[in-house]
Amino acid sequence: MLAEAKEEAAELLQQSNAVIERTIREIKENKADKQRTQKARKRIEEMKQKVSEGREEKKVMRDFSELKKMAKQMPSVSSSVQNTIRSHKLSFERSIDLRGMRADEALEQIIAYMDTAIMVAAGSVTILHGTGTGALKQLTRDYLATLKKKNRIIDYHDGDPDRGGAGITIVEL
């Protein structure tokens, strides 16, 4: 990659020198004719833009290589994250019971539970909110709708009629 970049830089330098020399020659030959001088200057400006674009590409490449170096220096962070995920997978329950909770308490539980479920790639989970007044079900569905909009979950629906029906929400991750 470095050799390729050096080759491109040398070619770009050669092109820019040619444009500058041609421009100077045209100005001398035309004895500073205003229109031709402006055209020549325009070509030089275009070449400057080309050169600055090349610099930006090099900067991006340099930034990317620095990021790769940093990633190699931080293997302990990624292994600790993997260990955390592994421990969450081992202790993860595929269902949560919200019955009897206040709305704010239930929302905290749903947020934490769904974050963990997404992190461990649970597949599908069950949220038991009961039928009652319907407040917990509505709260659950509203939060799940935001997750669906953000493409963090696939879908959600009532449970099977013989297994809780409208008192349960099944979430597909």
Image (cartoon, helix red, strand yellow):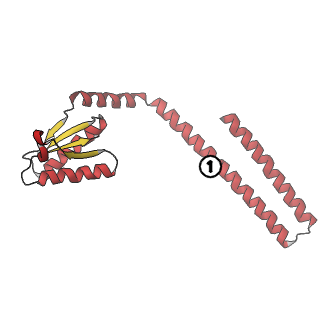
Left-right relation of 124 to 54: left
Q: Quadrant of residue 77?
A: top left
Along the line of sight, the residue nearer the viewer: 64 or 159: 159
Left-right relation of 22 to 118: right
Residue at (14, 48) in percent of width and height: 105
**Residue 60: image location, x then y, percent:** 58, 45
Helix, strand or loop status at disc 1: helix
User: Residue at the bottom extreme?
Assistant: 34
Along the line of sight, the residue nearer the viewer: 22 or 133: 133
Residue at (15, 39) in percent of width and height: 96
Query: Is 25 situated above or below 56?
Result: below
Where is the N terminus found, in terms of image quarters?
A: top right
**Residue 40: image location, x then y, percent:** 81, 63
The number of numbered badges drawn on the structure is: 1
Within 10 angstroms of label 1, few (less than 14), some, or many (20 or more) residues? few
Name the residue type under label 1: Glu
**Residue 108: image location, x then y, percent:** 18, 47
Where is the C terminus found, in terms of image quarters?
A: top left
Q: Quadrant of residue 116?
A: top left
Query: Is 138 situated above or below 122?
Result: below
Q: Which residue is mark 1?
A: 56
Along the line of sight, the residue nearer the viewer: 30 or 77: 30
Query: Is 21 situated above or below 169?
Result: below
Residue at (82, 55) in percent of width and height: 19
Query: Is 78 situated above or below 29?
Result: above
